[in-house]
Image: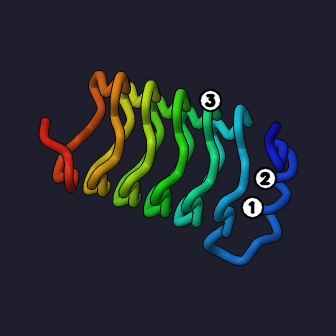
Amino acid sequence: MSDLTRTDVIKLIAIATKPLNLRGVDLTGVDLSYLDLTGANLTVATLQDADLRTALLNGADLRAANLTGANLSMANLNVANLTAANLTGANLKHANLYKANLTIAVLRKANLQDADLTDVIGYNK
């Protein structure tokens, strides 16, 4: 069970100073689709099976985050730091990963169909 709901996250986005700090928060299965999480600190957060379709995660810090089974289709992850993130089984179809850092990220069974991997760090196409 997650610590926060979609409504809770929307309220935090509205009142928080930027960037949003969700370090280590459990967001398992939460619908975060279409939300603006630009620059958010999501290090070591649990986003397993979360819905992040079309979410804006530009420059987000997702180091060591658990994104197992997350839906990141069409998400914008420009310059996001995904170092050591677990993306096992994640859906990254049509995601924008321009200049994202995927160093030692786990991408086993991840769907990278039509994802923009231009200038990605730490990933060999």
Mark 2 vs 3, N-terminal side: 2
Which residue was labeled with disc 1? 13
Please state which amino acid type lies under the numbered disc 1.
Answer: Ile
> Viewer-nearest of labels 2 and 1?
2
SS class of the residue under badge 3? loop
Asked if residue 66 is positioned above or below residue 60 in the image, the reply reads: above
Please state which amino acid type lies under the numbered disc 3.
Answer: Asp
Please name the residue shown 74% across and 36% down the image: 30
Q: Nearer the viewer, residue 108 or 54?
A: 108
- Tell me residue 65's x, y (percent): 52, 51
Judge the density around disc 3: few (<14), some (14-19), many (≥20) Cα neighbours within 10 Å. many
Which residue was labeled with disc 3? 49
Judge the density around disc 2: few (<14), some (14-19), many (≥20) Cα neighbours within 10 Å. some
Quadrant location, the C terminus: top left
Which residue was labeled with disc 2? 9
**Callout 2 touching callout 1 (CB < 8 Å):** yes
Asked if residue 31 is positioned above or below residue 58 in the image, the reply reads: above
Judge the density around disc 1: few (<14), some (14-19), many (≥20) Cα neighbours within 10 Å. some
Give the distance between the C-alpha atoms of the residues marked 2 and 3, in whole angstroms. 16 Å
